[in-house]
Amino acid sequence: MIMPIRQFQAQRMHAPRNFQSISPEPICLEIGAGKGKHALLFSRTHPQSQLIAIERTREKFLAMQKQHALEGQANLQPVHADALPWIVHALYPQQVEQCFILYPNPEPHNPAQRWLNMPFFEFLLSRLKSGGMITLASNIPEYIAEAEQQLVQVWHLPFKKEVIAQDSARTHFEIKYLERGELCQQLIIRKPEGYITRFDKFQPLQGQNAQVME
């Protein structure tokens, strides 16, 4: 079933606590980075890319921050925040080269909160540069199937579906699922040239507590 997608109310988003703005240079982004296993690996193997890794859960963020302090990659910036308001306040149109959403909460009791069912996904697409990619990974076949349907019928985006190799070890969840013998899949979603969203000219709120706009 296709979920109805209303317009995301970006102007209603208040800045996260202790928000700090960033410069408009191109970045890569990981949403829900957990303890940072993939973020640390990516920043080591892609030294020319700047990665911002967002994690909402304090315990997981502190674990990522601790390991980052040990490894010291200058091209990795861990952020402790809820992803939606942080992205609205921090990111510029077409700033993101790659975005990783690896094994998100499948929201079994609240399907409207799945990433491709959320109005926010349109805003996220506006931050993605033309030709940029979103990698969405899951061990739940129904989650991937629904996302495929949304990409075709709602977002009209090209994508490629891949089975994740058994020896892949990008996240702690991925290792656990593959060791159990579960099927892990990912969608590589591409934003084509000329793709239009309603937020293409929306500039970052830069930490100002936006008032509700009628």
Image: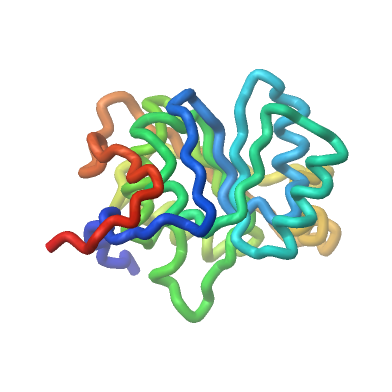
Of 147 and 126, nearer the camera is 126
Going by the image, does 187 lie left or right of 148?
Answer: right
Determine whether 152 is above or below 93 in the image. Answer: below
Quarter of the N terminus within the rendering: bottom left
Picture coordinates of residue 23 (x, y %)? 47, 29
Residue in view at x 29 percent, y 52 percent: 153
Question: Going by the picture, which residue comes out furthest to the left?
Answer: 214
Question: Going by the picture, which residue comes out furthest to the bottom?
Answer: 109
Residue in view at x 83 percent, y 45 percent: 67
Numbered-mark total: 0
Picture coordinates of residue 82 (x, y %)? 52, 59
Of 139 and 20, nearer the camera is 20
Residue in view at x 77 percent, y 46 percent: 37
Of 84 and 146, nearer the camera is 84
Of 111 and 73, nearer the camera is 73
Dividing the picture into quadrants, the one containing residue 73 is: top right
Dividing the picture into quadrants, the one containing residue 116 is: bottom left
Quarter of the C terminus within the rendering: bottom left
| Residue 43 in sight here | yes
